[in-house]
Amino acid sequence: MPEKQAKSNKESSFESCIHVYRAMKRMTQQELADKVNVSRQTIIQLERNRYNPSLLLAHDIAGVFEVPIEQIFTFKKGE
């Protein structure tokens, strides 16, 4: 009988530093939400790393801060 592979306990993680860029621009969550056409709750969830944005939303947010997506969002793959 073949052995089952053990599941990895390490999961991938996704982090954003939107709050840092908002602070540098002195922008509220609502102002950012309005600029990228989402709710303030979406921005809150992104800042708490509880929501993964679509590529389009990530692009729009990076555009507001005029930085590459990779500077705002970090993906770490579990090992």
Image: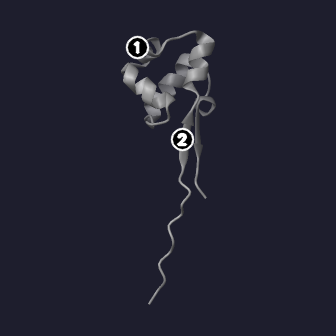
Amino acid type at mark 2: Phe
Disc 1 secondary structure class:
helix
Callout 2: 10 Å neighbours few (<14), some, many (20+)?
some
Q: Quadrant of residue 14?
A: top right
Q: Which residue is mark 1?
A: 34
Q: Which residue is mark 2?
A: 14
Query: Does 20 sit left or right of 41 as displayed?
Result: right
Residue found at x 44% / y 24%: 43
Residue found at x 43% / y 19%: 36
Callout 1: 10 Å neighbours few (<14), some, many (20+)?
few
Disc 2 secondary structure class:
strand
Q: CA distance from mark 1 to mark 2?
A: 23 Å
In the rendering, at what x and y percent does residue 29 appear? Answer: 46, 16
Asked whether residue 66 appears in the rendered view, the answer is: no
Amino acid type at mark 1: Asp
In the rendering, at what x and y percent does residue 10 appear? Answer: 56, 57
Q: Name the outermost residue toward the bottom.
A: 1
Q: Which mark is residue 1?
A: none
In the rendering, at what x and y percent does residue 72 appear? Answer: 59, 29
Please determine whether, in this image, residue 14 is positioned above or below residue 65: below
Please determine whether, in this image, residue 36 is positioned above or below residue 78: above
If the image is split into quadrants, where does the C terminus sit? Answer: bottom right
Eye-nearest disc, 1 or 2: 2
Earlier-in-chain disc, 1 versus 2: 2
Q: Quadrant of residue 71?
A: top right
If the image is split into quadrants, where does the N terminus sit? Answer: bottom left
Q: Name the outermost residue toward the top.
A: 26
